[in-house]
Image (cartoon, rainbow, N blue to C red):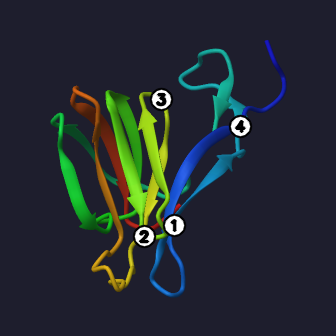
Amino acid sequence: MTTDAPALHYWHVWADADGTSHQERRTLRSFERQSMGGAAPQWNAVQPEAPDKAIFCVLPAGWVGEWHENPAPQWIVPLSGRWFVETMDGTRVEMGAGELSLGADQGCIVDAAGHKGHRSGTVGNAPAVLMLVQMEYAP
């Protein structure tokens, strides 16, 4: 068993001071060895922000959510299928099961092309099943 704390990579969708959305790869490193319910210790990265709600989504094959902001800061966890997120800066990221995104692009301003926030959609011929954990405040 390794004693080195793991690192978890995720895509962070955010808005800059000018109201333009971006994506960048970040790393969660705040893991500590802890027991849960008396089980053997495992690596946990407890997030101090309390979740507001959890939502399970099924995006049909071919679905596209045109330009919009995340309705609240939210962790997005693909469970099956593939989906993409494209931000105002032109970055497009495709994700599948086991990858992670933090949607925190609230406060965007409409650009010259009429884009605000991000657009997202399914990739391929299968639905994308996502779990969203919405927060009141961004982690």
Q: Is residue 95 visible?
A: yes
Give me the C-alpha separation between circle 4 and circle 2. 28 Å
The amino acid type found where label 1 is placed reads: His
Q: What percent of the width, then of the height, locates residue 83?
A: 34, 40
Q: Is residue 4 above or below residue 130?
A: above
The amino acid type found where label 4 is placed reads: Ala
> Which of disc 3 and disc 4 is earlier in sequence?
4
Give me the C-alpha separation between circle 4 and circle 3. 14 Å
Q: What percent of the width, then of the height, locates residue 78?
A: 37, 35
Labels 1 and 2 touching (C-beta < 8 A)? yes
The numbered dot on residue 88 is 2
**Circle 4 residue:** 7
The numbered dot on residue 22 is 1
Give me the C-alpha separation between circle 1 and circle 2. 6 Å
Q: Is residue 122 above or below residue 136?
A: above
In the image shown, does 9 or 92 lie closer to the viewer? 92
Give me the C-alpha separation between circle 1 and circle 3. 21 Å
Question: Going 30% across and 37% down the picture, which residue do you hit?
Answer: 130
Between circles 4 and 3, the one closer to the viewer is 3
Q: What percent of the width, then of the height, locates residue 71?
A: 28, 65
In the image shown, does 105 or 116 lie closer to the viewer? 116
Residue sitting farthest toward the top? 1
Give me the C-alpha separation between circle 3 and circle 2. 25 Å
The numbered dot on residue 64 is none
> Which of disc 2 and disc 1 is earlier in sequence?
1
Residue sitting farthest toward the front? 113
- The secondary structure type at the circle numbered 4 is loop
**Circle 3 residue:** 98
